[in-house]
Amino acid sequence: MHLTLLLTAISFVTTDVCFATDPLAQEYGELVFSSLLYRHGDRAITDLSYPNDPYRNKSYWIMGFGQLTNQGKSRHFEFGKWIRNRYSDFLPVKYSNEDIYIRSTSVDRALMSAAANLAGLYKPSGEQIWNNNLGTLWQPIPIHSTPRDLDESLSFGNNCPQFKKNFDDLQNLPEIKKFNEDHQKLYNYLKENSGMNFTNPIDDSLTLYDILLVETQFNYTLPNWTNSVFPEKLREVSELSFLLPTYTPILKKLSCGVLLNEIVDNMKQKRNGTMKTDYKLWVYSAHDTNVAGLLHSLNVYDYKLPPYAAAVFLELRKSKNSNNTYVVTVSYRNTSTHDPYLLHVPGCDSIACDLDQFIDVVNPILLTDWYKECNKSDENNVLIYFGIIAVILIAVSIIFFTLNKKYFICYCGRNYQKF
């Protein structure tokens, strides 16, 4: 009898542990809203290969330059199923446009990754089966996107003049100059063998590293000259390259400020019950730069290059304390063989960060008026330009008046007497 009860208890505990869908709920509180940003899946090289690349011809990339590969589709499909399991008690099995909102960059591989992910997340059932073939396995789900030049939250500063100015200014920092000096021999070697100009050595090193990495994933044999620099030496420079877009507070603000502001605003609306559509999950399908930038902006980045399908979860929870306060947990998933890593955001008292405290921590880099901040330098330049013109006109007038003072006095005197 006692043995039966013991086995039953063990079975119950084991079942609870193995099949727990939200492993954080018991300790940190009930999940009420989640913001998820992930990188796209595996892809081909882009059309910006290096001049001496033996595999730069399009015939080596039958899916097209920069496009999602079959492995990339499969990776995100499996990730979608993983999300389904984790959120099975939170996100209804049947798709509803009132439960989930999906945003993607306008890049093909990000859009396709979102579609593959959703296929794993929402298998049709019941009345959502729309035919007896494909309709039993897949259903179309809307993915929202904005052209890159108009995208304020995921463009990562690419269409922001002020970001470009501040980013270019990094090259004058002593530590960046020192890094480049220490790696000049490497840059010279890479320039000679790759055929690249290496006018921007850190960024060019990342480009080269990325190309070689993708080609090894396709089992292509790399040129012999790469043996001494790939992967270790090129990876070291590439890791710095991923830090630079969010290297300073202003760069964090211009690259991730709009995204973080949207995430925070959604959390506040969810807490206050004012969200127009009561979403449960808000998804962003983007790129490795977005993942690294978001983590670095929160000061929780491990300086390692985000792999395919790497994902950041910012989850709003109702705390189990007596006050029913809302807390934020931040998790990073960079492998399919381990649960997401819980991250402690600096400035927060604990891993489960009180929502108001979380807002205070990120507030310095939140951005609401993207256009004004991004074009501030241009507006200032216009004002300076008109200011210079005004000064020149005033100076010319003074000189002209001084040289012709006698004429003006006489002329004015005559007119005064006349009237």
Image: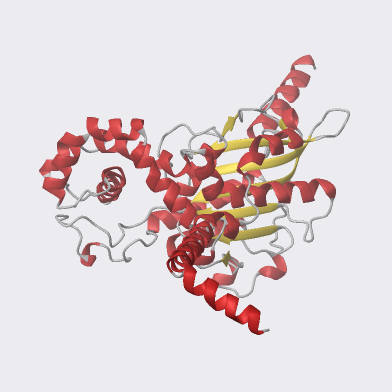
Query: Residue 46 location, x and y as percent?
Result: 31, 59
Left or right, residue 73 beside residue 57? right
Left or right, residue 218 beside residue 160? left
Above or below, 225 relative to 18? below
Res 88 visible: no
Pick whichever, 356 or 52, lies toward us: 356
Residue sitting at x 27%, y 47%: 200
Pick whichever, 49 or 398, lies toward us: 398
Res 257 visible: yes
User: Looking at the rendering, in which quadrant would you find the N terminus?
Assistant: top right
Query: Residue 42 location, x and y as percent?
Result: 39, 53
Query: Residue 129 location, x and y as percent?
Result: 65, 70
Residue at the extreme bottom: 418
Residue at the extreme front: 417
Residue sitting at x 22%, y 38%: 230
Left or right, residue 74 beside residue 252? left
Above or below, 347 relative to 287? above
Above or below, 325 relative to 3? below
